[in-house]
Image (cartoon, coloured by chain):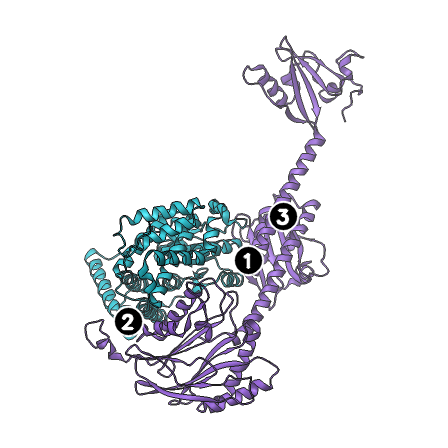
Chain colours: A purple, B cyan
Amino acid sequence: MVSPEAHSDSTTEPGSPWDGAPYPVLLTDVQGMVVLSNAAAAVLLPAARPGARLKDVAPAWLSAAHDVLRTPGLEASRPLSGVMGARSFEAHPSVQADGSVVWWLVDDTDHRLVREALTVERERTAFLAEASNMLLSSLNLGRCMGVTAQLAAEYLADAALVVAPSRGRRMPVVTSLRGASPTTKHEAADPNDVPGLSEALRGFPPVPSRWIDPGGAPRWMVPEDFGPVGSIVITPLPGHGVPAGALILLRRSDTMAFTQNEEVFAQLFAARAGAAMSAARLYAEQAAITDVLMQELLPPTLHQICGIDFAGGYRPSADHERVGGDFYDVHPAAVEGEASLVALGDVCGKGLEAAVLTGKIRNTLQALLPMADDHQRMISLLNTALLTSHHTRFATLVLASAVRNGSDVELRLTSAGHPPPLILRKNGTVEEADTSGTLVGALPHATARTAALTLSPGESCVLYTDGITEAKGGLTGDSQFGEDRLKRALGQCGGMPAESIVEHVQMLAAQWVGHRPHDDMAVVVIAAPRTHHLTAVSGHTRGRFTS
Amino acid sequence: MTSSPNRLQDQGRIRNLADELWQAVQATDEHTATEVVLRALEEGMEPETVLLDVIAAVQGKVGEEWADNRLTVAQEHAATAISERAVAALALHPAARTEPTRGRITVACVDGEWHALPARLLAEVLKLHGWRVDYLGAQVPAPHLIAHLHRSDADAVALSSSIATRLPTAHAAITACQAIAVPVLVGGAAFGADGQYARLLGADAWASDARTAADRLARGPLARPRTNHQPIDDLPHLADQEYTMVARSSAALVRTVFTGLEEAFPAFRDYTELQRDHTTEDLTHIVQFLATALYLGDTDLFTGFITWTARVLSSRGVPLQSLPPSLGILAGELKDFPRATHTLERGINALGPVPPPTTGNLA
């Protein structure tokens, strides 16, 4: 520390008032010659004796400041600063009437260090906030690994690798070079070959960061064209009580090695990245489980089977759900020439719980397929099965057996407490199938009456749930879409392909309800395909047979 | 590139195929439609050309025919179903088989959007360009889209919307995707003829058609969006709450206008249920477009819709007298909302003089 009391080759008279000044002081004349230097200044700049030129004895920044001061119109407005020896100073000039200048030199070393530390901390806080934002925004493991590697390469090192614990024989590794997009590889490497890596990958308890000898790093760890490696540090990525992986930071030999401070900071970052990665991993695992279970409950995709067109559409009551209390299935005939069985139904209730019961009913019906030609018996057995199960819910359903007969389709339809199917005739009329019965799962005996009818080519049969007809909307907002509107709409659909009838009905019902809440809605259309030469009689085209 | 006589010949072939497909689609003749498409492939036509210059061209004509009342909505659906089957047949043909060599793209329609074919065509074109495509289909609720993106790590989402009234929903979907750092490319008639609404809603890219979309994606990856973006940053005018108010009370507004029309036009009281349903539907569209115009802060959207409606109604033989009074009643109901009032006035002016009603008077 420069002390005013310091004794040295003072250029002021001993006891001069300048020596009592708390700062080094230099007085220079108009020509830039040192006139006076106090005791503190003499310690700082021993050569700055009276008669010396400031330019020769002071650091360049100070003499430059002096020149600026002497040039009219270029007056420096704020204190100038620079380094002298190991410390830094602010220079405050006061210009005298005769043109001479008194330079007060104020030591601001500590102040500067504090400011610098503050800037670094602010940058780090901003970085951590940004990193958290980016990491928290994704629940995809690959993306989280990419973001982690990229951020680490941008702020912490010249290159970064994120290694996830391997499920199989290969380790997923995301590598990011500064300024490049991350790349993903699956390395067939053994983490035990790298000191510290397998411990870091185990995650718990978290191990401290580990330095490894850059020379001993395996080839996969160093990106191509990276150049000589200066330092490598391996930091664990601790997750939510499960290991999320390890972060490997690499610096080139011409970059400064990691300081302890930087290493602590890297761990702060690793804690956030690890939490994000393990959240993504848990989400992926849960989503995979849900997917498998959901596959059994989702309505099937329908298409043409045994020469009959089938199409189905489903809209659960809540937009965020994929399943609900309505269901449908098409079981192709086991033997060519026999009927395929369609089932469409509605379990009382909504959401996942109702969907689970639909799964049960669908399984039961599947088991009863050998007696698919006897609808009454199927319904009666299903009724018994539902009564004896622990579910207290009941259901309504329609069974339809469909078989091709020449170009016609023979249908047998049985409703168990369900709205009767509607038949679209070629002439545009819409008929209700003459079938009715009791719902299943409520009474000791379920009875039903079956309707038999024939579809000519281009005619269809529409099975639907009451979610369609009971959809509330319209002008008053609480009038039901109703069977009359449905029939009227279907009257426009004569000759249409099965899937566009489904789509049309779904769209009309959706428009009717608008944003209002609604029940699950399901539609299935069974259609007798239009025979080839129908083009000739459709009335739209010049009458010609396709070839 | 082929020499110009060849190109002319190609264009002639494309036109002929489109004519044939149009005939088949109009007649709901799946067999011929599929046969036309497969024959084009067998003869060596590029699958992309068949998708965009034949099938998409025919689908464009379906839309025009509907607007001019030469097809009903049901017939439009039937025609679209035939086009869809033609696309499906093309996708299975060996000529269209492409190994994925590029990244992964999710293609979806905005929730409430039933016109899936443009998105389906884009999905097939992107597959032909070597992308791995997840096609989610029509009306995808945002929660499903986001759940899919979390699981698939797509490089980008291509979002399709053809009806402008879906734009507020589209905006929600765009910002939701961007919030999880997935860039969004949008397309479809809803986003405006030159993509002005795509820019307004902060989409990362806009494409006028499937070819442009494929070119844009081929040029390089869309930048990952910043995740700290707020929807209100795009549309500061939403702070006046006019959109929220109109959207929330749309059912009540439709009822008020309907009652007002009944008073003004006694003939209304004799309307059949079907006619009343149609009027309710038309009024609902007007209110939806008004709300959307307020959301976007763009009166032109509303005036454009009103003049289009007038054209469609006249082509269906519906008298137009009720249109200006409907807008007048709405303006009266919304008199405390300056943007809504201004928009409705512009709509009334855009209609110009309409023959005065013979059965009643609103003034």
Relative vertical location of residue A16 with respect to residue A343 in this rendering, above or below: above
* Residue B137 appears in view: no
Relative vertical location of residue A116 with respect to residue B23 in this rendering, above or below: above
**Total numbered labels placed on residues in the image:** 3
Say which element carries label 2: helix
Can you say which quadrant of the picture contains the C terminus of chain A? bottom left
- Residue type (three-letter) at the residue carrying disc 2: Ala
Residue under label 1, please give it: A143
Q: Quadrant of residue A192?
A: bottom right
Tell me the number on the disc at residue B33: 2
Say which element carries label 1: helix
Chain at tag 1: A
Q: Residue A517 location in percent, x, y?
A: 50, 65
- Tell me, yes or no, whether the two marked residues, 1 and 3, touch with CB atoms within 8 Å: no
Q: Nearer the viewer, residue A545 or A149?
A: A545
Say which element carries label 3: helix
Give the class, few, some or many, for how many residues have Cα within 10 Å of label 3's Cα (few <14, many ≥20). some
Tell me the number on the disc at residue A128: 3
Task: Name the mark nearer the viewer: 3 or 2.
Answer: 2
How far apart in space, not on screen, are marks 1 and 3 (Cα)?
Answer: 18 Å
